[in-house]
Image: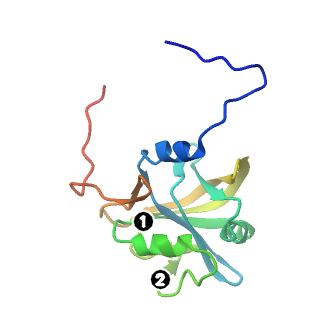
Amino acid sequence: MTATHEAPGSEPALDTALFRHVLGHFCTGVVVVAAVAPEGPVGLTCQSFCSLSLDPPLVMFGAARTSTSWPRIRRVGSFCVNVLAEDQQEVSTRMARSGTDKFAGVDWDPTPPGAVRLRGALAWLDCELHAEHPGGDHTVVVGRVRRPAVASGAPPLLYHRGGYAALNSGRPQKLRPA
């Protein structure tokens, strides 16, 4: 193996298009993070979501620093993470836009603490804001889960190589441990 050595204090320039292309090969689920602000429901689409801890129960996601929705959700202090189903592409696309009424024609119900639970979502996680950390052009948000719920066994909405994707069989296949 050949190692490349750079002069101390210098880093090679990273091709951001290549970086984005490589990361696109990692398949993710799609969630909508939503809350009810004083001016009404507010939400954002996110594919950078994952579990962080079981004890305490924490999840995390990345919110773009340019997001106009995240500051409004932050002010509320609590939110619902909605795990989208395969048939919710339009909801995902709508919540990713800015400058429009994202909730026009979107069916939702309030969760017990008053966040936004999207009808048709596979699962929900009612969370309170636990922490925020700078993460380059994003803010890494950590939420403490207060109420998790599963609603459906339908296939999830996936994102892969810059577009929506589906499970081939409708069910993931379990792989044998290595």
Furthest-top residue in this view: 1
Quadrant holding the C terminus: top left
Foreground pick, 141 / 93:
93
User: Up-down: is 142 above or below 106?
Assistant: above
Location of residue 174 by image quarter: top left
Determine which residue is flagged by label 1.
84
Report the amino acid beneath label 1: Leu
Q: Residues within 10 Å of mark 2 (few under 14, many from 20)?
A: few
Q: Quadrant of residue 159?
A: bottom left
Q: Position of residue 54 (x, y in %)?
A: 53, 44
- Residue pictured at 60% horizontal, 82% vertical: 100
Would you say residue 114 is visible in this rendering? Answer: no
Q: Which mark is residue 54?
A: none
Residue 127 in picture, x, y percent from top left: 60, 61
Q: x%, y% of residue 114?
A: 60, 76
Judged left or right of residue 40, residue 86 is: left
Q: Position of residue 14 (x, y in %)?
A: 62, 37
Is residue 178 toward the left or the right of residue 123 in the image? left
Sequence-first disc among 1 and 2: 1
Please indicate whether residue 92 sits to the left or right of residue 76 in the image: left
Q: Residue at x 41, y 69 (%)?
A: 121
> Which mark, residue 106?
2
Amino acid of disc 2: Val
Residue 63 vs residue 154, the one in the foreground: 63
Whole-number angstrom distance, CA of label 1 to CA of label 2: 13 Å
Reply above or below: 104 against 45: below
Of the pair 144 and 16, the residue shown nearer to us: 16
Horizontal relation, residue 28 to residue 96: left or right: left
